[in-house]
Image: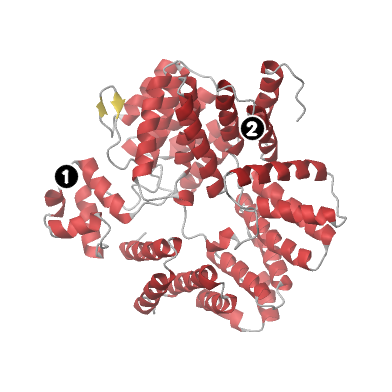
Amino acid sequence: MTLEEFEYFAKRRNIEISLSLGEYEQAEKELHILEREEKNANLKQQDIHRQFAILYLLWKKEYQKAKKHVFQALVQTLPDIQENMAAFREKLLRKLWLSEAEISLLLMYAYLKEKTGEESQKLFQCIWDYIQLKVTEQETRDKQSAQVKCFLAQIKEKNQQWKDCCEDCEAVIETEAKYGSLLLIPEMMAMEMKCLEHGASHEKQELRKKQYEILREIMGEYGIGMEEGLPIFLIQGGVSEKQLLDELIRSSRMRKEFSQEKLSEGVCTPETLSRIETGKRNPTIKHFYGLMQKLGMGMGYFNTYFDAERFETLEKGRELRRLMVLGKLKEAEIVLQEIEAEIDGTKVKNQQYLAFNHAFLECELHQGDLKEIFQNVEQALMLTLKKKEERFRIYYQPTQIEISLLNQLAILHREMGEQREAVKILKALYEYYHKGKLQGRERDRHYFMILGNLASYTEEIDELEQAMEYAEEFITELLKAGRGNLLGRSLITKAYVQERMGKEICLTTYEQAYHICGLFDDLRNRKVVENHVKKHWKIDYKF
């Protein structure tokens, strides 16, 4: 981002906070001020009108008012939409190329047309056709297609087209499960059950009924409803894994061991820096630029895992992560070798990136000596972190790759039978996350990884009450964030702890874990559950 964009982001962040706290009048006031300040910036105006629409959806469900703002947002970059809708739909497929933001806005517009009683199915279908025709990246196409199918299913349900609605629901469930998302599945399952009651059928219907019962049971236990609400992907603000401006500056200063007086010298007064660090004011562009220069930080310091000259190399980094999540480790090895050949290995950040990925793959593929892998990870960490009392202390904001390395260090401690050392590192990371302001969906994927490991490792050192607390928090946070791919694992940990506490309810939890693992195609953990119950409970437990 440019500095101007970063300042805009900071103001937008304040509005997001107001929306999340339900301070709608304050959010409306701040949006009007921002609209006047950015009146000549098309992309910012587009974003501002989208925020207005979200505000009126959340505040009073003023669909008509929200629709006007979405239309104004679209006009900023798609003036052709002011023609008649039939002509626009035709031009969309023949000539136009859309950004992800524009696709999202078109979806929102079609949704609001439906809510205000206008015909919308043709626009939804046109968006579907556009995605199939012009979106080439597989994951993006799949996820956007699922969002459109979700809306089309709602229309078909209203029109009592039960068979077609059932097919759309099933398509959405399978796509969401494929990418580990739980955001759309509860609503689609509930709608699918309604379709089945009205005579629709499909080959997986008995399995889906059971999975629906289990999911409803789990969500009910944790106080999360399955009723239809505003589509979450329409109102989500920004992206995950983002940092807050005040925390970024304060933590970076502590990382450099600068006092406020030293950092502010020649940039602003210590009092101004103090107000910036406590979130009482945002820095000006001049101040922010000066502070970043003194801290020796570029704009991408906290936002990428490694530095690369070519965009294509960064894309390979994304592909590497995807392959690791899917367990395609041999393919991941090849991509890592390509990345290593294309980046500057003398840069500290890149050294840490390569050290983490090599360690991860070597552990998963059972290659190399554990002590040697451990030393490599530890040396990579010590390029930027200080080791005190034989473990790393986290007293400032670590980078994403440092968090990955610390978590990997904990895993290696555990693999070598040093669970207590692993727990010490994980608890330090856990406390770091709980000191920050980011909550729920904004917390990055590392938080869930650390929480899951902490629950498992605490059980292994016989701290059962603490392990249960971590396991319950793990499940709650996963449900709130709509992350389904780790839910089966979290339920297995909970069941293990219940079993060790002598609670027979663990059989119910094992059953939940079995079906959730099946829903998200986690066949390895599903088999673990099945084998464990048969072996340790001496019964042929039928899931």
Q: As shown in the figure, which amino acid type bears the numbered disc 2?
A: Thr
Which residue of the protein is positioned furthest toward the right in this rendering? 199
User: Is 290 left or right of 356, judged from the image as shown?
Assistant: left
Q: How many marks?
A: 2
User: Is 411 left or right of 183, judged from the image as shown?
Assistant: left
Indicate the position of residue 336 as horizontal and vertical percent values. Answer: 49, 34
Q: Secondary structure at mark 2?
A: helix
Which residue of the protein is positioned furthest toward the bottom in this rendering? 83
- Residue at the spot 50% in from the left edge and 77% down from the top edge: 76
Q: Quarter of the image for the C terminus: give it.
A: top right
Task: Work out whether residue 424 can be spotted.
Answer: yes
- Residue at the spot 60% in from the left edge and 30% down from the top edge: 492
Q: CA distance from mark 1 to mark 2?
A: 50 Å
> Do residues under tags 1 and 2 come within 8 Å of each other at their CB atoms?
no
Question: In the rendered image, which quarter is residue 326 located in?
Answer: top right
Q: Which residue is mark 2?
A: 509
Q: Secondary structure at mark 1?
A: loop
Image height of 291 relative to 351, above or below: below
- Residue at the spot 59% in from the left edge and 38% down from the top edge: 487
Q: Quarter of the image for the N terminus: give it.
A: bottom left
Q: Which residue is mark 1?
A: 258
